[in-house]
Amino acid sequence: MGESSEIRRLIWDSMLSADLNHRYYGAFADLLQHWDRGAKILVAIASSTAVAGWAVWSTPELSWIWHGAGALAAVVAVAQPVLDPTKSIKTAGQLTGAWFSILRDYNLLWASVHIVSETEALNQCQKIIEKEKLLAELEATLTTRRQLARRCEEEVRRFRGTQTGG
């Protein structure tokens, strides 16, 4: 019974981690998409404002708007390809899908943990863990947003409750 409890705990904890990662990378992809869209809109508006500034804001009191808008548009336009948010959005999207698949596998395993042997449960768990290992390289290409990770962890706790694998 003790070993069974340990296996159940391992599966439960792994399922929580998969849920957290699925939520995190989904939220991270959304965040990156909002930032990317906002940056593109900012460049468009600031560029238009800078051009409009030639005629409208040529007065000395308002010239700072023209200069500031032009500088801001230039900085954001140069930063976009360097930061390459499109690549990060794609990576976060791939990770979201992969973690969803892993989460589904853990959910199915958790649902059957009472009816399969300990050996079978452990074997299935190890197969899922192998899938997780393949994601490490992709995950390493993205920076971690600690606040976002904490928010996702709180969501998992609220959703999953205080149930444990033991």
Image (cartoon, rainbow, N blue to C red):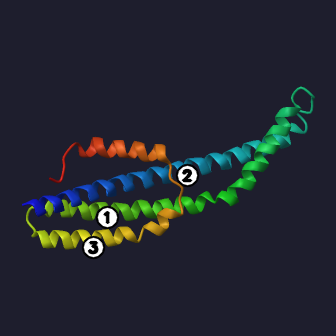
Where does the image place residue 155, in percent across and percent down from the top left? 34, 43
Where does the image place residue 159, in percent across and percent down from the top left? 27, 44
Secondary structure beneath disc 2?
helix
Secondary structure beneath disc 1?
helix
Identify which residue is drawn at 12% across, 63% down: 3
Where does the image place residue 34, in percent across and percent down from the top left? 56, 47
Rate crowding at label 3 as few (under 14), some (14 to 19) or many (20 or more) other CA atoms within 10 Å: few
Dot 2 or dot 3: first in sequence order is 2
156 to the left or right of 35: left
Q: Quadrant of the N terminus?
A: bottom left
What type is the residue that disc 1 sits on? Ile
Residue 121, numbered circle: none
19 to the left or right of 89: left
Identify which residue is drawn at 26% across, 55% down: 13
* Nearer to the camera, 54 or 163: 163
Mark 1 = which residue?
102
Rate crowding at label 1 as few (under 14), some (14 to 19) or many (20 or more) other CA atoms within 10 Å: many
What type is the residue that disc 3 sits on? Lys
Q: How far separated are the C-alphas under marks 2 and 1?
A: 24 Å
* Nearer to the camera, 162 or 155: 162
Q: How far separated are the C-alphas under marks 1 and 3?
A: 10 Å
Residue 33, numbered circle: 2
Rate crowding at label 2 as few (under 14), some (14 to 19) or many (20 or more) other CA atoms within 10 Å: some
42 to the left or right of 126: right
Mark 3 = which residue?
127
Where does the image place residue 56, in percent across and percent down from the top left? 88, 33
Picture quadrant where residue 130 is located: bottom left
